[in-house]
Image: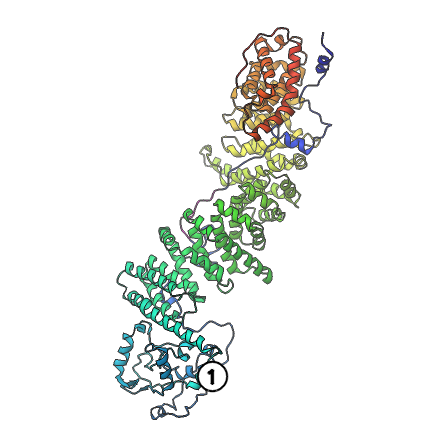
Amino acid sequence: MLSPSDKKLEKLDPFYRPSVSKQKTSAEIINEARNALRTVRTQRPFTPQEDQRKLFGPKSSRTPENRPPSSFSLHASSFESPDSRPISGARLSPLELKPKTPTSPTAEEDSFLSLPKPPVDPAKIRRISSARARLFRAASQGALLPDRTLPAAESKKTVKSEETVTMGDSMVKINGIYLSESNAVGNLKSHPLQLTYDGGFSEIKEQEMFKGTTSLPSLLRSGGDQERRRARASSCPSHSDLSRLETTGSKADLQEKDTEKEVDEVFWNTRIVPILHELEKEENIETVCAACTRLHHALEEGNMLGNKFKRRSILLKTLYKLVDVGSDLLSLKLAKIILALKVNRKNLLNVCKLIFKISRSEKNDSLIQNDSILESLLEVLSREDLQMNTEAFLYCVGALKFISGNTGFLNEMISKGAVEILMNLIKQINDNTMKCGVCLPDSGHLLVQVTATLRNLADSPLARRKFLSIGALPDLCTVTEQYLDDKDVCNNIARIFSKLTSYHDCCAALANYSRCYALFLNLINKYQKKQDLVIRIVFILGNLTAKNNQAREQFFKEKGCIRTLFSLFQTFHKLDLNSRKQVGDGGAQAKPQRQPSGVEDVLIKLTRVLANIAIHPHIGPALAAKPQVVGLLLTTLEYKSIDDCEELVINATATINNLSYYQVKNSIIHDKKLYIAELLLKLLVSNNMDGILEAVRVFGNLSQYRDICDFIVQKNVHKFMIALLDAKHQDICFSACGVLLNLTVDKDKRVILKDGGGIKKLVDCLKDFGPSDWQLACLVCKTLWNFSENITNASSCFGDEDTNTLLVLLSSFLDEELALDGSFDQDLKNYHRVHWETEFKPVAQQLLNRIQSHHTFLEPLPVPSF
């Protein structure tokens, strides 16, 4: 006789009986994800590195005539003289020439009073005082160069005296000494500063002219013209004029400044001038390069870098001449010094081009690393004005792009703030575009280089943390919206996102930016046939929807979401069919592809998105009811074998698996379930274990319908499921056991478990995987419970050996101390405890009670070790 409790157990329904009337909650659906729903993974699209370093690669949407050149010639003559007239956007009005006659001209000057003087550069007139302008005009015919440096006291005496420099046809009088013209020029050339003499200066520093640090300038012939022109000697301003031009300040301050100037003069003559003479010799490259290194250190030591140093023009002229030597190593050293001297406009552009030209060759990467030019380039981007130097920035960032392609530079660039500096450029471009309302072409060219450099930096974990810390992802989305018509910019940013969203933290940050979903749909619609861009957008969407239920919902709610995905699927499905026809027309049999084609790869990523969003409890039923979506998935399984494209077939099957989970009245999956079962048979008989696993999972969902159970038995699929229990693979055993569990709901089909030793294999699964997988152990117990519903004798039901094994196993598994003893890690132990208490323990206790109540003899067996 059975006790009341045993009778109560007898009345329990079989496990996994489908209940259409009961609507599962979202939590229940997610908790049962292993049973039916799962996300799909895929590889990130791979782009091979370009063979040649160019501003714009061979796949650029820009035509050669509509983009800046990557190749150009660069010489010393390309650089502007540092004394040249600055570029001005204003139109200047002409100045009237009003020469003044000296109040007390000398006899030698009388003969020159009637000679007209050329007008002075108006741009320089505006930068100097009227008194200095008079002196400037007086000296405009000749070349001004200081003779020598005098102490402060002697200098003052010189200013007070009325020394006159005269120049005749053959004689020049300087400080009371008469020299012939050849001796005067020779004396100038022997001066340490002669290396700067190139036929005349057009400008001289006003502090040197008016503060008594130099003697009177000598007036020499300008040019070397065969027709010698006479020039009027300039007279030195009086002491009273000087005092009126002095700024307010104490005499101590003036003396201190004079002392500093004397120190600068000594440092210049003793440290800098010898190096400049050495550079002029150009004996060999190594010597010149070493001299450049010493020059840079000396200038830095003497605080002579920057654009405030008065002899900066002398340095630059010497450095520009050395560009023609043509050595990459020397050019790098020259560029580093020139940038340190803070050149601008055309010279800044040319020096950036110089570095860009050097960086185009990979063999120069070691030179760039040794010379630390990175810091100079980044300083240009952070210091100079973007709008004034857009073209210079283009080549500067282009060089950084090439350098960042070498992984050895990544950490150095990131540690020096490359990510922050480049993202600041993007923000400036965003702001300028918003103000102007138009995307300027030059900004687009620059953006291609900036985003390509960020794309290379995104490979580093350190860069990913930088992207997150400065909130870069929304700014990248904004610039994509503004430059939606620029495919190169969109493609680079898509490559950045495809790298970043492969990691959970970056993926979560982008998913939280709600505007990104509409942006990605716009990109798909605009560039639907641009495979290289579309494949990355779809990959990004697959990453966003992989683990974030909110992202699935936000994406699905965007207007035209499913329509866009369906249109994209249809477009590439047709392309894939056409490619197959072309292969068939060629007469050669198509060979199995080891790697999917580009068209197939788009379909792979697209089916992954569909599979991921189908996990959402509201989206899944909606997709299952769309005949277009289900139809394309079934068509994929019809014309594609797993040998043709493994990943596409597996992803399509996984999507059908997720959609088949939902038992809704208008489900297309429900209507076509028998046809789907037929398609899955070819996967079951394949040699691909991943494909077999996906097919078994779909059968696990479909076997909840009676007609599918009949199909399984008719086609002997159940024997295949029993055989899979020997696979020694937990996921395969779990899925196969799920199908057998659904089959045992029908009393007429329970006998199939005895075919092929199904009971013994279930007991072996419980023994092998029970302690580490309580979900699988629970599934085995549920299957055995259904099988033993009408039990009258345990031994006749399970067999003596299996009955005794079950009694020992279940007793030991229900012992908490023994069952959880193997979980040493606290988190893992808590995980096992939840599944053991909520899933396995109630079912195992029921099964154990049933077996014990129908078993009269228990053969003692040793307790198994785990």
Q: Is residue 49 magenta?
A: yes
Front residue of this view, candidates 399 and 712: 399
- In the picture, measured across the screen, residue 635 lies left or right of residue 665, that is left
The magenta stretch spans which residues? 46-53
Within 10 Å of the Cα at label 1, are there few (<14), some (14-19), or many (20+) other Cα atoms? few
Front residue of this view, candidates 676 and 185: 185
State the image quarter where residue 100 is shown.
Answer: bottom left
Q: Position of residue 243 (x, y in %)?
A: 45, 83
What residue type is disc 1 on? Arg
- In the picture, measured across the screen, residue 169 lies left or right of residue 49, that is left
Q: Secondary structure at mark 1?
A: helix
Question: Label 1 belongs to which residue?
Answer: 244
Q: Position of residue 95 (x, y in %)?
A: 48, 83
Q: Quadrant of the N terminus?
A: top right
Q: Is residue 635 magenta?
A: no
Q: In the image, what residue occupies the spot 31% across and 59% down? A: 290
Rendered position, 276 above or below 715: below
Q: Position of residue 851 (x, y in %)?
A: 64, 12
